Structures are given as C-alpha cells and as structure tokens.
C-alpha cells in the first residue's frame, strides 16, 4: 500500500488571509486557490498547505495550529535575512549537527523550523 503526504492543514482563530500572508512572505508559498468563507490553499514548495478558520459544519472536536513544519534551504543566510526584514519573530538559532537551524514564530502559536541543507 503506497502512501504519501496529502496536505498540512492549519486552522486558526485569526484571519486566515493574515496567516497565509506569513507563509507567503517568509517561506515563498503561493496561493493555489481561495476557499470562500474559510481561507485558502497554498503551495509551499510542493506541499499543499490549507489555511482555514474553524469549520462550523464539522462534527468532531477541532483545534488550532500545529507544532511546526520544517523547511530545508540551500540559502539559510538569505532566508534568515528575509525573516528579519519581514519582522518575523526568531525564537531560537543554533547549529545542530553541523548545520544552521532556527525556529520562527508563526500565527496561532505554531512554529516553522528552517534547516540549512548541506
């Protein structure tokens, strides 16, 4: 049985367009489509990222956010400079197993991890 990642869904109590803008401005995501009344669907370098509000007609208990999504880059310094230019909150920077890593605060308490690709 073959399986693969289908999408990552971020639910927010904030304006989903504001949350989507964070991923667009800081990680180069692009809008694939708008989801009227709920949010939007982004392409995050080949990963589908759904950003929506709480969905009123779902019956199961819903929560907001995720722990983190990790993105690897071959231009760590450039990406870090872009975060700082955009006013993103850098939570921690370190060198881990010989490569630079940082965590960035995302909306609704989620975090993004940036990893230097070596």
Image (cartoon, rainbow, N blue to C red):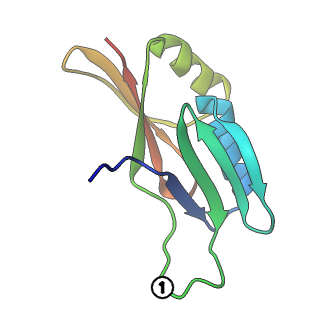
- Dot 1: element: loop
Is the residue 32 above or below the residue 67 in the image? above
Q: Mark 1, residues whose alpha carbon is within 10 Å: few (<14), some, or many (≥20)?
A: few
If the image is split into quadrants, where does the C terminus sit? top left
Q: Can residue 113 be seen here?
A: yes
Is the residue 24 above or below the residue 4 in the image? above
In the rendered image, residue 11, in percent from the top left (x then y), is placed at: 57, 64
Q: Residue furthest right?
A: 36
Q: Is residue 58 left or right of residue 74?
A: right
Q: Nearer the viewer, residue 84 or 66?
A: 66
Q: Is residue 64 left or right of residue 5?
A: right
Q: Nearer the viewer, residue 88 or 69?
A: 69
Number of marks in the rendered image: 1
Residue of label 1 = 60
Is the residue 99 above or below the residue 35 in the image? above
What residue is shown at x 53% (from left), y 88% (from top)? 59
């Amino acid at each position: 049985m073959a399986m693969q990642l289908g999408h990552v869904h971020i639910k927010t109590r904030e304006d989903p367009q504001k949350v989507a803008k964070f991923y667009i401005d800081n990680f180069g995501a692009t809008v694939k489509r708008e989801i009227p009344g709920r949010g939007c669907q982004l392409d995050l370098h080949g990963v589908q990222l759904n950003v929506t509000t709480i969905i009123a007609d779902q019956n199961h208990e819903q929560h907001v956010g995720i722990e983190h999504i990790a993105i690897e880059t071959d231009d760590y310094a450039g990406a870090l400079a872009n975060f700082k230019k955009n006013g993103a909150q850098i939570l921690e920077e370190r060198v881990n197993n010989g490569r630079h890593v940082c965590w960035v605060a995302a909306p609704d308490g989620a975090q993004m991890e940036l990893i230097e690709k070596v």
